[in-house]
Each structure stands twice: as C-alpha cells, then as structure tokens.
Amino acid sequence: MLNAIRQTKELSHESAIQMCLAAIAHANTLSANIGVVILTPAGVELAAVRMNNAPLHSLGIARKKAYTSASFKVSSLSWQEKLKHKPNTMNALLKEDNFTYLGGGLPIIVDDEILGAIGVSGATEQQDIECAEHAIEKLLSSLSPSK
C-alpha cells in the first residue's frame, strides 16, 4: 500500500524570529544593513525583517534566496557553479519568479532534515552568507544541550 500521509517538520515562528535577530546582530558587527527572510520547507514565510537602512530590494531578494534554498535544499550560491557552463538552463531558471543564484540563501537542516531556509540580502554577497550562517549557528547551538 502507498503511504498516503507524510509527516514533515518545520521551524517554529519563534525560532524564525530569533534567527532574523541573530542575522541582524551579525550584520551590525559588519556595519551592514540587510533584509532577512525565513521560510518553511514549503516556501511559506515565517519571518521577515528589513533593517531601516537596508536597500529597498533587500527583502525581495532575500526571499528569492531563501526560496531557492528551500526548493533545492542547497545554498543559493551553489547554483553559480552548477550553471557556469549551462547558459540555457541559467536563462530558463532566472525567468522563474523565486529563483536566484546570488549567495545568501541557505537551507536550515537539523538531523538531516530540512526545517526551512534563510535568505539574507543587502550587504556584500559574502557578508550576506556570513549573516545567514551566523543565524543557523545560533539556532543549532540553542538546540544543543548545555555542557
């Protein structure tokens, strides 16, 4: 018999908010202004915050980064290498509303299961990635038992 029901897990909205705050705290150490979006594995928005001086496009781009990562379960940046020698595929994917190969989108994976994705935009590509990584590290450390 086919499995008719599939159980999935996703981040809580409380965790999503804390991740946004962690990414922003790291951006402050870089003197950067960012937008942060956290999505469920199905691409539903859990939290989004734009720092006051972040570019107006930052939330929209952050959402694309997170959506790309949630959809493919890899970093948005990984698509730069995957598409480097495939211009037709790149052109086709770039026509999709929620796809980008810009760095700053990461899947949020706990115990080999994707619980969501984070997208950060507004600083340099490397700073966006650092802010997203910092937020994930904060989440993972909050899940680990205290020593």
Image (cartoon, rainbow, N blue to C red):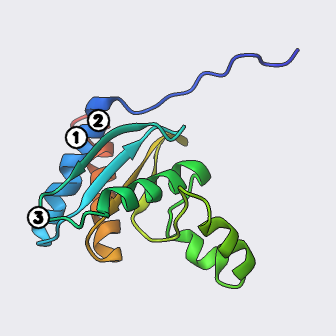
Mark 1 nearby-residue class (10 Å; few <14, some 14–19, many ≥20): some
Residue 8: x %, y % from top left: 56, 27
Q: In the figure, 138 relative to 93: above or below?
A: above
| Residue visible at 20% across and 51% down in the picture | 22
- The one nearer the camera, 102 or 5, is 102
Q: Marks 3/2: CA distance?
A: 20 Å
Which residue in the protein does label 2 denote? 15
Q: In the figure, 10 relative to 128: above or below?
A: above
For the image, the number of numbered tags is 3
Whether label 1 touches label 2, CB < 8 Å: yes
Which residue in the protein does label 1 denote? 18
Name the side, left or right, on which 43 lies relative to 27. right
Give the position of the N terminus as an image quadrant. top right
| Residue visible at 11% across and 64% down in the picture | 28
Residue 70: x %, y % from top left: 53, 48
* Secondary structure category for the residue under label 3: helix
- The one nearer the camera, 40 or 147, is 40
N-term-proximal mark, 3 vs 1: 1
Q: Marks 3/1: CA distance?
A: 15 Å
Which residue in the protein does label 3 denote? 28
Q: In the figure, 9 relative to 83: above or below?
A: above
Q: Seen from this angle, which residue lies furthest bottom?
A: 85
Residue 91: quarter of image: bottom right
| Residue visible at 61% across and 54% down in the picture | 72
Name the side, left or right, on which 46 lies relative to 40. left
Residue 104: quarter of image: bottom left
Q: In the figure, 77 relative to 2: above or below?
A: below
* Secondary structure category for the residue under label 2: helix
Mark 2 nearby-residue class (10 Å; few <14, some 14–19, many ≥20): some
